[in-house]
Structure formats: structure tokens, C-alpha cells
Image (tube, grey):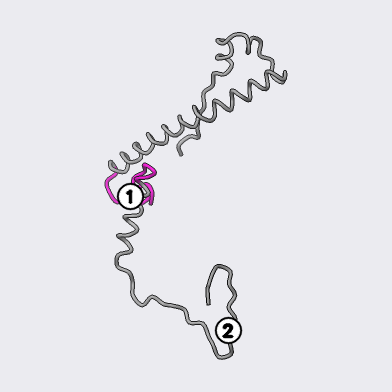
Amino acid sequence: MKFGSGNIVRLKKGEKIEMAESKRPNSGFAEFMDSIASQIGATLEISKDLLIKKYDRSYSAARAALMEVWKAFRMRRLWLVSDFCRPVYEVWLSEAVAIGRIKAPGFFDDPLGRKAYLESIWIGPAVV
């Protein structure tokens, strides 16, 4: 008999299901989870302490880890603004000016004026 997801198995009279039970605790589970959390944190550029929110070292170490992760967050935020938000805003504003929804004299004629119209500052959510 082959089992897969969503199978319904009908039992014959007198048959019953026995569940497999683990009779032993796995003493290496904590080390395994610690290792996995370290690897995930390294991939995300977040320390293990921040990832699992378990601060068992000093305040200075926790503060340094927070400052380090904010560097990575700021970098990702800048990337999102430069590679997504600004190009989308530029296309949106260009279309809005072209169809007359927004009046922006000199938008298509003057490159410096266009740059001034497209100038923007993107602010992310505040740190709580």
C-alpha cells in the first residue's frame, strides 16, 4: 500500500491504528536548533540572539548586535528606494503629467526641472 497526502485508509474489522511513539528524548535537539538558528541568522545578516530574541549575553553585546543589524536594514531600505520606489514614482509622475492629470510646466522640456519634480525623500517606519 502506498501512502500520500490526503489518503483515506479503511481498516478491516478488528484492525486498529497504532501510533509510533518516541520512547527516548533527543539530547542533541538543543544543539541542533542552536546551529540552525546561527545559520539562518548568518544568511539574514542577523545575530542568533536577535533572531530568536534570547539575550543571554551582556547589554553591550545586545546593543552592538542591534546596531549591526540596523546597518543591514538601512542598506536594504536604500536598495528598495533606489531600485523600486523611485523608478515606480518616476514612471507614475511621467504618465500623470503626460495625460494632464498633474500640471508640471517644463517637465518634459527641461532636464533640471524634471529632476526637481522627481526629487523625493523616502522615509521608512520609525523604530519602536
Task: Name the residue type under label 2.
Answer: Leu
For the image shown, how many numbered marks are present on the structure? 2
Residue 1 shown left or right of residue 75 in the figure: right
Whether residue 83 is in magenta: the answer is no
Observer-nearest of 62 and 103: 103
Q: Where residue 22 sits: x, y (%)?
A: 38, 75
Q: Is residue 113 above or below residue 121?
A: above
Q: Which residue is rendered at x = 61% and y = 24% of the image? A: 91
- Marker disc for residue 55: 1
Q: In the image, what residue occupies the spot 66% across and 10% down?
A: 105
Are there few (<14), some (14-19), or many (20+) residues within 10 Å of tag 2? Answer: few
Give the mark toward the camera: 2 or 1. 2
Residue range of the region highlighted in magenta in the rendering: 42-59
State which quadrant residue 72 falls in.
top left
Residue plotted at (44% across, 34% down)? 76
Name the residue that disc number 2 marks: 11
